[in-house]
Structure formats: structure tokens, C-alpha cells
Image (cartoon, rainbow, N blue to C red):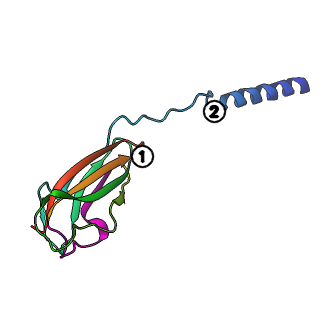
Amino acid sequence: MKKNFGAIVFSMLMILSYGCGGSDGGDTLEPEDTKNPEMIISKPGEGANVMLGNDLLLSGTFSDDMELESLVVSLSFNETKAEKGIEDPWEPGNNPEIIVLTGVEDELINHKLFAEKIPIDCKSGIYILTLSLKDKSGKSTSKQINITIGG
């Protein structure tokens, strides 16, 4: 009887250890990110006019099929389109600005860019706002918006 009991216990242990063995040793594949992130910008629009002394505001919706990571926003002066100005072009201290985004969709509403107002003595003219959206897998998309400051 002891021999049968031992054999039964051994058999049960073998069945349990085989049945609870977990995976078959194959790696679980993560879904592949095949799409670039997308952005819809509602503010500022192409050709928008922003007065000196005001905030430069950004509103938009950002999406990705897997997960968003960040939006990098930079501002540059279009030398060929200068109008008038007392001083130098606006060069924000926080340029470029990196905005952390999360999830598959994120939204910014009236986000104050560069954490400062446009100086009242900067050069008026056309500036180029460049937005670079990146997802967690490294895919990206970019957009440029021409805005007039001080016009």
C-alpha cells in the first residue's frame, strides 16, 4: 500500500508540475507600433496674428495607436519676412519646450508656450512654430505653423 501511495503521490506531483509549468518557453511578443502619431492643432492657426505682450497659446489633440511620449515645440524667426521692430527677434528662454504626453490620446487647451509672454520690444514679423510629436516607440511626425507676431 505504501508503494502505491508513493507512486500515486509522485504521479500527482508530476502532473501538477507539468500542468503548472507556465509558458512553453516561447517569448511573448509585444504588439508592433506601425503608425506615426497624429496631431490636430486648433490654436494657433496658420497665419495667426499674436500681439506683442500677449501669451502664445497652443491648443490641439494628439493621438497614437500605442502610446504618446512627448511634443517638442520650438520657435524661430523667419529672417526673410521681417516687418518692423525695435529690438531683436523673440527668443524664448524655454525654447524648445518639451511637453510630456501620455496615453493613446492627449489634449492641450490654451497651453501657454515657453512660460513667458511675448516681449513688447521684440521684432515684429513672421515666426515659424515647429511641433514635433513623438510616441514611445520613437515614431514621430512634425508640423510647421507660420504666425505673425506684433502685426
Residue 106 within the magenta-colored segment of the rendering = yes
* Contact between labelled residues 1 and 2, with CB atoms less than 8 Å apart: no
Q: Dot 2: what SS? A: loop
In the image, is 101 to the left or to the right of 150? right
Give the amino acid type for the residue marked by disc 1 in the picture.
Lys
**Residue at image point 81% right, 29% down:** 9
Q: Dot 1: what SS? A: loop
From the image, tell me which residue sits under label 1: 136
10, above or below 81, in the image: above
Whole-percent x, y for residue 35 in the image: 33, 37
Q: Residues within 10 Å of mark 2 (few under 14, many from 20)?
A: few
Give the quarter of the figure containing the N terminus: top right
Along the line of sight, which residue is nearer the eye, 19 or 95?
A: 95
Along the line of sight, which residue is nearer the eye, 139 or 21?
A: 139
Whole-percent x, y for residue 103 in the image: 37, 50
Along the line of sight, which residue is nearer the eye, 46 or 14?
A: 46
Using the rendered image of the protein, determine whether residue 43 is visible from the camera's viewpoint: no
From the image, tell me which residue sits under label 2: 22
Give the amino acid type for the residue marked by disc 2 in the picture.
Gly
Residue 89 within the magenta-colored segment of the rendering = no
**Residue at image point 33% right, 60% down:** 96
Using the rendered image of the protein, determine whether residue 70 is visible from the camera's viewpoint: yes
Whole-percent x, y for residue 99 in the image: 35, 59
